[in-house]
Amino acid sequence: MYNFYKILIFVLLLFSNASYAYDSAKGKLVAEGICSICHGINGIASSAGNSALVPNLIAQNKLYLIEKLNSYKNGKIEHHQMSLIAQMLSDDDIKNVAEWYSSIEIDIITEIEPLDY
């Protein structure tokens, strides 16, 4: 009987994470409809990220994006456009958009030669 409970707990823990999964496909749809105008569908801002007002979101940390969007939504951070946009988003929209932008992978290519010590 003890083994049965161990297995049951293991299975419950295994599948409990499914409810916390965010949907990057839904996030991409929201990004296409709302975010892409300024931040680009692939997270590269129309201002090329050279503006503090419109940053690149490509490969940004998911928890950071969730925190920032929630801060705009609840008025902790005020911005004339982002505050209004964030208030239009549901909590699931915020998590899904964060999942989408954080899931985009980038390669960093540099022409700088490593130093030989």
Image: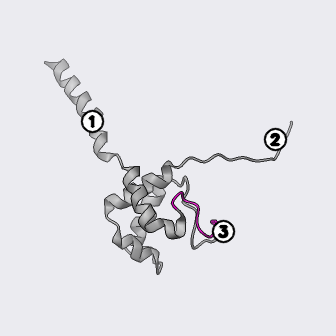
In the rendered structure, are the residues bearing label 2 and label 3 in contact, judged by CB atoms less than 8 Å apart?
A: no
Q: Amino acid at mark 1?
A: Phe
Judge whether 112 appears above or below 66 on screen: above
Nearest to N terminus: mark 2 or mark 3 = 3
Q: Quadrant of residue 57?
A: bottom right
Residue positioned 48% across, 58% down in the render: 64
Residue positioned 42% across, 71% down in the render: 72
Q: Amino acid at mark 3?
A: Asn
Classify mark 3: helix, strand or loop: loop
Q: Quadrant of residue 55?
A: bottom right
Residue positioned 54% across, 63% down in the render: 40
| Observer-nearest of 73 and 5 | 73
Nearest to N terminus: mark 2 or mark 1 = 1
Judge whether 116 appears above or below 52 on screen: above
| Observer-nearest of 97 and 60 | 97
Q: Give the magenta part as a residue range.
A: 41-50
Numbered label attached to residue 15: 1
Judge whether 117 appears above or below 85 on screen: above
Q: Amino acid at mark 2?
A: Pro
Q: Which residue is mark 3?
A: 50
C-alpha span from label 2 to label 3? 27 Å
Q: Residues within 10 Å of mark 1 (few under 14, many from 20)?
A: few
Residue at the limit of the structure toward the left, as seen here: 1
Residue 77 horizontal side relative to residue 113, left or right: left
Q: Which residue is mark 2?
A: 114
Numbered label attached to residue 69: none
Q: Main secondary structure of the magenta part?
A: loop
